[in-house]
Image (spheres, rainbow, N blue to C red):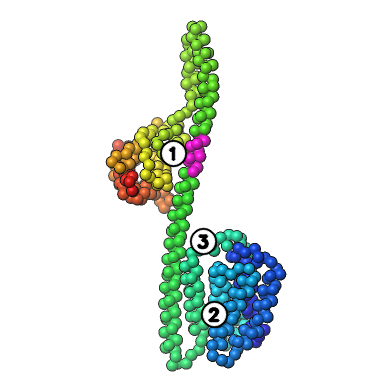
Amino acid sequence: MIFLFCAENIITFLAMAVCGYQFCVSDAARNKKRFFISTGAFFLLLPAAYLLKNADFQFATISFTLLITAQYIIFLGILFRCLNLRLIYIISVVELITEHLSAGLQTLLSGTALSDFASLAARAALLLLMIVFYIKTDRARSAAAAQLIPKHIYVLFLLALFFMSGLVTLNSYQVSAEKALQKSCIINVLILILSILVAVILLSLMFNVISKQQSDATAKLLSEQVESQIRHYDRLEILDNEMRRFRHDYTNHLQSILSLIRMGEYSDAEDYIEQLQKQKPKVSSIFYTGNKLADAILSDRAFSLPENVRIEYEGVIPPGIENTDLCVLLSNALDNAAEACAKCSGSCVISVSAASKSGYLVLTMTNPTTNSAEFTDLPATTKQDKLRHGIGLVNIQQTVRKYDGQMKINCAGGVFELTILLKLDK
């Protein structure tokens, strides 16, 4: 029935067009005149495809399939005013999905009066889903997400759809008893191929997720570096402004103190000096390690510590360590030390020292701890959320291995000591 045939292909063409609108960036697709011209031209050529489908000569089915596919590609190319691999991929995916759904419905409805309309129903359902997806999702984000998917995933997905459609179609065919064994063998081969393709797709997606998580972690570290450096420079600017104001009034202060001394008001002069000492700019949170990132991280952590905890630093950090790795080492070590000091009463000192020896950087950090246990290995976290905590030292250990170094831990006598040895000429 030519009307049913035309309706099926028109619906499929519209589904491809809606999908193209969602995933193609071309603004030419929004031209209504171009849309009606492309759809009308496609509709006019459908009778030729119908005659070719029902023609009684060899390779008629292959010719029909090629003609329909060519129509999809040509007229969607006219509609979107471009013909690229993404558009061809969209055409292939929609066509394979519709064929797969049609074959599945025909199998379910075989022997009933509705079997002739199974293909039309499948294509109409697909078009409806495409329209809902188009309305509910953002077009720009969908196009950007489509570009992030690796090309080999597209190819594997197409192959999986192709063999899946073949499997469903073959399963719906009724064959004689002599060919039943041959049909069973072909189905088993298709199932095996599909299993391999699905396994490869899942592995590829898993590796892509892992790579994305690593990229996100690196981006987070870089963001933390930038924020630490910005805060560090802001505090340097505040300190500089305080020093400017202090120097501006310095002469007046000296003159006032000198006048008090000459007048014999020694106690007032002493009080004046004590007041000036209290107004002295705070410089304890500014560090100079030889590395600007390390300066920023130390200053940022020192600024956020409570009043009873301070950081003491000595030494120079030489070049040869990547910023992301240095951020992992210092940030995690200082955070762990700050958490340990927060449990201690009284004043606490986090001591950090760096030294370069024979091509190696030796970074040592000590801090008080309430942990009475003695250990020289990675301790287990004492927090309830063990999946999200207790990974600071593990991250440090992984970074140390990257530089062919060593990490030593020693906790004894209420003092935790972390020593890191990194090879600088890596």
Q: Is residue 16 magenta?
A: no
Q: Secondary structure at mark 3?
A: helix
Q: Earlier in the sequence, mark 1 or mark 2?
A: 2
Bin the neighbour count of mark 3 within 10 Å (Cα to Cα): few under 14, some 14-19, many 20 and up: few
Q: Amino acid at mark 2?
A: Gly
Quadrant showing the N terminus: bottom right
Front position among marks 3 and 2: 3
Find the distance from the CA under tag 3 to the CA under tag 1. 35 Å
Q: Foreground residue, 34 or 96?
A: 34
Q: Earlier in the sequence, mark 3 or mark 2?
A: 2
Q: Secondary structure at mark 2?
A: helix
Residue 330: give x, y in percent of width and height.
40, 42
Residue 420: give x, y in percent of width and height.
33, 43
Asked which quadrant contains residue 18, the reply is bottom right
Q: Residue at x 52, y 17 (%)?
A: 251
Q: Earlier in the sequence, mark 3 or mark 1?
A: 3
Q: Residue at x 61, y 71 (%)?
A: 77
Q: Residue at x 33, y 46 (%)?
A: 425
